[in-house]
Image (cartoon, rainbow, N blue to C red):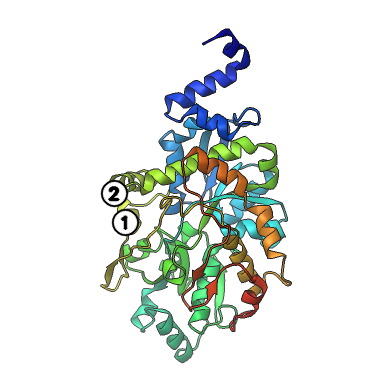
Amino acid sequence: MTDLLKHKLTRRAVLQTAAVGAFGVDPALRAAVYAAGSDAPEKTEVKIGFIPLTDCASVVMASVLGIDQKYGVKIIPSKEASWAGVRDKLVTGELDFAHVLYGLVYGVHLGIGGPKKDMAVLMTLNNNGQAITLSKKLADKGAVDGAGLAKLMASDKREYTFAQTFPTGTHAMWLYYWMAANGINPLNDAKVITVPPPQMVANMRVGNMDGYCVGEPWNHRAIIDGIGITAATTQDIWKDHPEKVLGTTGDFVKKYPNTARAVTAAILEAGKWIDAGLQNKNKMAETIADKSYVNTSVDAINQRILGRYQNGLGKTWDDPNFMKFYNDGAVNFPYLSDGMWFLTQHKRWGLLKEHPDYLAVAKQINQIDIYKQAATATKTPVPKDVLRTSKLMDGVVWDGKDPKKYADAFKVKA
């Protein structure tokens, strides 16, 4: 190295470049992307909260495999008990980031479902892979799908109780959408309660609810335990739907933009690793089944991440739209339309009294510039458009272009 180069590179930059080079990322590529000053993470150790669910896997594997070190950070995964707990610790700064429900982040930003605080979504962690479980008792009476449930609720009148995991979260919205598409008003025709994901199976076992919507492995676990059946998967409701996100506060992103980018890149690469093949998925299942993470048996996790489904009543199928963590980058882009969709449902169900400025809110929260930088560092393809078009189970198309009209058009609402 010449004297001139030695003079130009600080010791920290030399160490960082050497480390990056050792891990096989081209320093020239990084320098080109982050030309404006040092790209070194401002905070090198970060605490990331997660709930015991299969879709925490890319956060956990980024740490376990040491991918985080490649980007100059150390991820400390922190197991949390409930989404409300995750929310509170994010807001107070006890957690730097979290594996978190998309709708929770949006709710906090607007002051619904908790304290109001500017929030940020850095990337989508996974698509698909949640489900709606109905109790075996309901199934025995013919409620094995949405139509069967609607018929039973109409004929056998009583109070029906269903659980979701957080009032503004993804599971509440999938449950409500599915029920409404089958002619059931979730707010008028049923009682809806909030239960943390790992407690769903135990609560159903003692008869506290008739059904629930949650992430895996807690749907498959109900089948293994013989207490529930899968009435619908969330990919049946919306193919390739957004699910968990990497969330943090707006303040954190402003104060530590390089850290936010480095963590996003590390988790992107971990998602790519998981989706790369059968061997990696099985290794992931073995890792996260451990009591320090999801705390369940490997067989409760590994079937559905490979798309091998059963409904608990003898039906089996191979689902091509199983939980995906990368899918050639299609999973992870923080589409503005994805965030806006949750706001339309918050308005539909009375969580928001007035229409927000949907697009403006999504632009405030979804950190597209940071994501694009992380995508460049990990050679992840980026879509051309910040909006995407999807057709949901009832045939209604969502494209993000007229959210107010979309939100107001539903017949079944609060």
Chain-order first, disc 2 or disc 1:
2
Residue 332 sits above or below residue 234 on the image: above
Q: Identify the disc placed on residue 278.
A: 2
Foreground pick, 173 / 331: 331
- Where, quadrant-wise, is the C terminus in this rendering? bottom right
Q: Is residue 76 visible?
A: yes
Badge 2 element = helix
**Cα separation between marks 2 and 1:** 8 Å
Foreground pick, 283 / 400: 400
What percent of the width, then of the height, locates residue 333?
53, 52
Badge 1 element = helix
Q: Residue at x 54, y 39 (%)?
A: 263
Q: Is residue 264 visible?
A: no
Residue 277 sits above or below residue 145 on the image: above
Foreground pick, 274 / 390: 390
Q: Identify the disc placed on residue 306.
A: 1
What percent of the width, then of the height, locates residue 17?
52, 23
Q: Residue at x 62, y 68 (%)?
A: 401
In the image, taking residue 407 as reference, residue 162 lies left or right, namely left
User: Image quarter for residue 322?
Assistant: bottom left
What percent of the width, then of the height, locates residue 394?
48, 79
Q: Amino acid at mark 2?
A: Leu
| In contact (CB < 8 Å): disc 2 and disc 1 | yes
- Other-residue count near label 2 (Cα within 10 Å), few / some / many at <14 / 14–19 / ≥20: few
Q: Amino acid at mark 1?
A: Leu
Number of marks in picture? 2
